[in-house]
Image: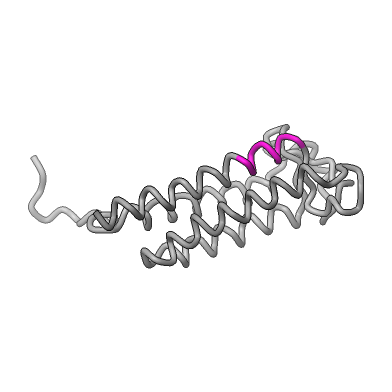
Amino acid sequence: MAHSRARPNPADGKAPVRRVAGVVAVLFLLIGAFGFVPGVTHPFSDLRFAGHHSGARLFDAFQVSVLHNLVHLLFGIAGLAMSRTVTLARAYLVGGGAVYLVLWLYGLAVDPDSGANFLPLNAADNWLHLGLGVGMIALGVLTARRARA
């Protein structure tokens, strides 16, 4: 039996696109933070500020650098800020998805061992960026559409 003085759920009445944008933002914050955790990022001693010389891998798969981790953290902060309104939340998901699709194309075009691979990116990153791009755009379009219906 529910208590009559139960605290309200903060998600009650919040548009789905805002909730989804907030969840995506928190995931980016977690991934950015995990990039600085030894053991989750391995070998941690190979973590460099930027560039393809950073040999550290998040979850032993995704090549990361300090810059790469900072980008994830900033993307998460931006998502939390933008999840405050329906319009901005949709823009975060759709626009962020577009950015990730461009990053996917960049990862396919750049030589992994060149100085142009400044984030750095590997094949696992490229597949993840494709999935993030398509997924974020789909979430932005589908959840915003439901909010209007």
Q: Residue 28: x, y in percent?
A: 56, 51
Q: Position of residue 126 (x, y in %)?
A: 70, 40
Taking the image as shown, residue 144 lies to the left or right of residue 69, namely: left
| Residue 50 position by quadrant | bottom right
Number of dots carrying numbers: 0
For the point 58% across and 39% down, which residue is it? 131
Q: Main secondary structure of the magenta part?
A: helix
Q: Which residues are magenta?
A: 123-130
Instruction: Give the residue displayed 77% in from the left and 50% down from the top.
Output: 65
User: In the rendered image of this protein, does residue 59 appear above or below residue 46?
Assistant: above
Up the image or down, 143 lies above or below 59; here it is below
Q: Look at the picture and state if 38 lies above or below 15.
A: above
Going by the image, does 99 lie left or right of 51? left
Residue 27 among magenta residues: no
Give the quadrant of the C terminus: bottom left
> For residue 38, which quarter of the picture?
top right
Q: Is residue 51 left or right of residue 4?
A: right
Q: Residue furthest right?
A: 114
x and y percent of residue 115 in the render?
91, 53
